[in-house]
Amino acid sequence: MTVQDITLELKETLKRLKNNFYEQDKPKNLRDTTFFSYVKEETNPVFQLVEQWETEAAEAVKRRELSIHPQQVVSTRENVELILLHSYYIDVKEERYMNLYNSVLYVLDIILDETK
């Protein structure tokens, strides 16, 4: 998969996570093992996707195919991981969530523009 393909897939995943943040009820018990297992099962593919995205994006930056800074790639991965967990545990305010979300979208959109 190219960095563009992975970025598109990641962007779609983020839309789904945002819907989850707004539509899912906050978990009653954060220590519930059933809920933890559910979250782990749901999030593992996304963690793998964002890891793959980081690798491909970092390589593209090294090859000077993308004009973003290497730290933006690292920060975007970290922000995606935060969004991922907050989308299930619903443990941050909406403003914080949307700041993370928009920050990630900004970088993903730059990559998509530059890889057209």
Image: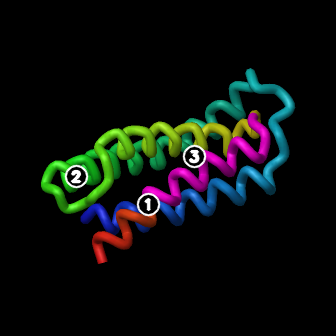
Dot 1 amino acid type: Leu
Q: Secondary structure at mark 3?
A: helix
Q: Is residue 7 above or below residue 42?
A: below
Q: Is residue 52 visible?
A: no
Residue type at the position of mark 2: Val
Q: Amino acid at mark 3?
A: Glu
| Viewport quadrant of the C terminus | bottom left
Asked whether, in this view, residue 85 is left or right of residue 93, the answer is: left
- The Cα–Cα distance between marks 1 and 2, rounded to whole angstroms, is 13 Å
Query: Relative to 60, is 105 on the left or the right?
Result: right
> Mark 2 to mark 3: distance in Å?
30 Å
Q: Residue at x 66, y 31 (%)?
A: 36
Q: Which mark is residue 42?
A: 3
Q: Is residue 58 visible?
A: yes
Q: Which residues are magenta?
A: 92-108
Please tell me which residue lies in front, 106 or 33: 106
Q: Residues within 10 Å of mark 1 (few under 14, many from 20)?
A: many
Furthest toward the top, the residue is 31
- Residue depicted at x 63% and y 54%: 17
Task: Please name which of the two marks, 2 or 3, marks the residue nearer to the observer.
Answer: 2
Q: Which secondary structure lies at badge 2?
A: helix
Query: Which residue occupies 36% across, 45% down?
Result: 73
Q: Which mark is residue 61?
A: 2
Q: Is residue 32 left or right of residue 77?
A: right
* Residue under label 1: 108
Asked if the stretch drawn in magenta spans residue 71, the answer is no
Task: Using the rendered view, name the quadrant where residue 22 is placed.
Answer: bottom right
